[in-house]
Image: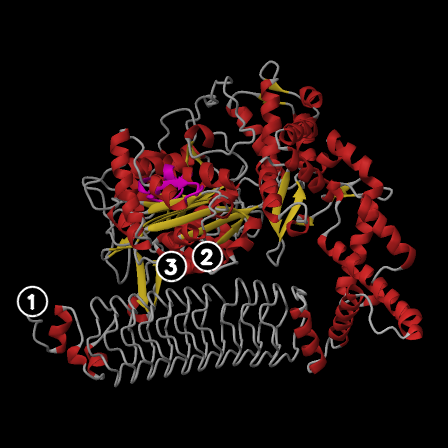
Amino acid sequence: MSRDALVVGINTYDRLKSLNAPAADGEAIAQILQQCGEFQVTRLPAVKDKENQTIRIGKQTKVSLTQLERAIVQLFKPDGKPPDTALLYFSGHGLRKNLGIQEGFLATSEVNPDTGNWGLSLQWLRRLLQESEVRQQIVILDCCYSGEVLNFAEADPGDRGKGRDRCFIAASRDFEVAFEEINSQHSVLTAALLQGLEPKQDRWVSNYTLVDLLNQEHHPFPQRPIFANSGEAINLTRKWNSSPVNSIVQVSAICPYKGLSYFDCTEADANLFYGRTALTDELLEKVRSGNFLAVLGASGSGKSSVVRAGLLYQLQLGLKLSGSDTWQLKIFRPGINPLQSLALAFVESELSDIERASQLAKVEELIAKGAVGLGQLITAAQTQRIVLGVDQFEETFTQCQDITKRQQFFECVLGALQRDDNKLCLIITMRADFFGKCLEQEYGGLAKKIQEHLVTVTPMNLEELETAIIKPAKYMNLAVEPELVSQMIADVEDSPGSLPLLQYTLTELWQQRTEERLTLTTYSKLGGVRGTLQTRATEVYESLSLEEQQATKRIFLELTQLGEGTEDTRRQVLQRDLVSSQYSEAVINRIIQRLADEKLVVTSTLSNQIAVVDVAHEALIRHWLLLRKWIEESRDILRQKRKIEAAAIEWRDRRRVKDYLFQGKRLREVEDFQKQQTENLRLSDLAIEFIQASVRQRRNNRFRLIAFFLIIPLGLSVVSIVIEKSVRINQLWQTVDAARGKKDSDARIQALEKLVQAGESLAKKDFSGANLSGANLSGADLRGINLSGASLNRADLSGVNLSGASLNRADLSGVNLSGASLRRADLSYLNLSGASLRRADLSYLNLNRVNLSSADLSGANLMRVHLSRANLIGADLSSAILIAANLIGADLSSAHLSSTNLWIADLSSADLSSANLGSADISSADLSSANLSSADLSSAILSRADLSSANLSSANLSNAYFWYAKNLTPEQVKSAKSWQKAKYSEHFRTQLGLPPEPAK
């Protein structure tokens, strides 16, 4: 193994103060690396010692920038094969240039900041390290100048999790001075390094044991080394007079594997957690540089383990991230009541029951205040940082059924992140298929936050799998047959959710071990991962209720792709397609959740955030005897079912044209199949709709025949009421279908009105771009309807159900939507000018760029609505609720907002000129750059509102309440009317030249 080191110690400078310690520092480091580390050391500056004919670091010799650059390039990017390990040590002056952009430099002898010569750029070094192929990189910087210590972050590439092992150490924090040791020829840092590198036992000193010693050192100066480690341990020095002691733990009575459980944040679990070093380092880098981290992956991918035994345990140790051992770490699962679970996370576990109850009551009282209360808890904590982990974040959707509590929890934890001190770091782990749930409502920007700070847990590669199998056994002094390792990897490779199954099988192998050895023979007797898995599957199935067993059978049959001359394989299915009239969405979701928890299925999402379900392992289809029995019993029926469903999909994709409907013999066969199908193989809802449309078409054809032979020849004036109604409804639908694709059609509007009156549902129909102006559709079922781009000018939509409907860019000017349900509807770019939305519930809707000019929104609930860039000119919003609404750039000129609740709303850059905001609650709102000229703000509450650059010229401020308002200037206030009559803090009154408020 090749090991190279470049040791630099510069005493002599032309323009800077010359130093005493660097040359001695560098020579001492060089000698210990040579003698105890087997490093090939290059010294800079190098001089010949004439007394003993050796090379040493020169005390008086200068080092130029060109020399230093070439030496570092030769170390990390040599012309030939790079070394396995490369170490750079620098002692000398460090400079920091702060001209618009802060830059750090290693000072060479000729530096002269006055002429723009600063030395070697750390940004250059950072790029060089990123491009270097050296796997193990060590950089130690012991430098300062005029009280400025070099901040090593500029030299650290920071790309954690890239398969490299790295160690960075710097003399002190960026606000501290780096000193020379008293009564010593060395600096404080190098003196500690020499002590740490001196091997005390016959075992390697690594970068981790070295920084452990640095953490324990206490110097009489306000200086503490900073460091960052990533990857595996890098061996530095050791004694060479004997073989290293075998440090393997001599314990085999403890199982080194976790079965279906996760690895937790404990020393016992972390010592057995292998294979995720690169991912752990990536997570550490995210925590170092940010305050939010979302770890998403398929069920069974190891999210909880890598966060608990990987990330949090490394933070707890403090050997990879400088100072993290002093942070407070808290982790919890949301459960049924996320806010209560959050409060419990802040209660000290070592207290007595009475003390815990008392502390819990106080914490719950604070948490009840939301983000403000949580912020107070964080502020009061005596620590540099609090890391709050929310494991299995999807429980906020699966277990917490109270939407209000869920919303409060999201607002609490996300709101508390809006701190300037970065003291809180929030980490969540969540199954990837639940990301779609985060998009259903605004949830305080949760989905966007996740997308911006996402790390996806991908399957382990072959090397990582091998490590996860062998290393825990080796730690417990167990032997593992190489043939067993190869076979297990082959059995789980490319299988989603395989890690718990692998651990479960390894646990069974350990329980049946012979002579402290895990063998392929025992593995074969168990049936491998396949045998262990099918046993587990049968146990789970038999534990379910009868209804759940029937639904589970159907789920697994749907997840099986029948082979045509090949083996049956996995079949990925949309989770929503498993819902039927027999098994509701709630039932299916509950069973999928259970099967995913038991690692029998894997849930994930497509690129468009639609949840999909997959079998955890194909071996389940091939070798689970119960499932094989179901498949063989149902093979023919399954094939028929899939053919019908495929025909239904084609009909839907062809815009439901009647030419694609079944007829004649084929339709009769399908009807027979539908009657005879078993409970577990019911057709999809789309297929049933397809058959019903085919039957309706056949009946319509028969009615025409009856009319020809019966009505016309006999001249009958009356036919059966049932037949007449059916014919009429069919004719109305034909009229609607005939107008498909056309913008204007009075016949379509009349037909739709009659269909609604007859009780027909318009759910999921496509009327995009259609002109439905003036249509009376009151009380209609419009769930999921596509009205994007449609014109509904002056239409009557009172009492309609528009849940999940698409109204993107539709024209609803003058429409009557009183009492309408608009849950989860897409209303972006909508024209609602002059519409009546009085007391409507529009909370959480997307109304981006919607035209609401002159609309009546009085008393409407617009909490957390998205109204950025919306046109609200002249709209009546009096007494409306706009809590936390997004109104960035909205045009609210001349709008009526009296008594409106705009608490924490985002009104940045909004136009509120001449708006009536009398008695409105605008506290904590963002009004930065907003135009409030000539607005009526009399008696409005603006406490804690951000008024940075807001225009208040000619605004009426009579009795307006400005206590604790942010970024408010006297110049802004004095441009308004009646500013002397507003309420200000005493300090701001003084700035305005106003006398103190009279005592009450």
Which residue is disc 3 drawn over?
64
Give coordinates of residue 820: x percent, y percent: 52, 67
- On screen, 782 above or below 19? below
Give coordinates of residue 372: x percent, y percent: 29, 55
The earlier-in-sequence mark between 1 and 3 is 3
- Left or right: 679 as drawn, with respect to 289: right
- Left or right: 464 as drawn, with respect to 116: right
Say if residue 234 shows up in the picture: no
Query: In the rendered image, which quarter is residue 97 located in?
Result: bottom left
Q: Real-space Cα distance between discs 1 and 3?
A: 74 Å
Q: Real-space Cα distance between discs 2 and 3?
A: 52 Å
**Pick the front one: 683 or 607:** 683
- Give the number of the mark in front: 2 or 1: 1
Marks 1 and 3 in Cβ contact (< 8 Å): no
Magenta segment, which residues? 314-337
The earlier-in-sequence mark between 2 and 3 is 3
- On screen, 76 above or below 948? above
Disc sitting over residue 446 in the figure: 2
- Left or right: 659 as drawn, with respect to 327: right
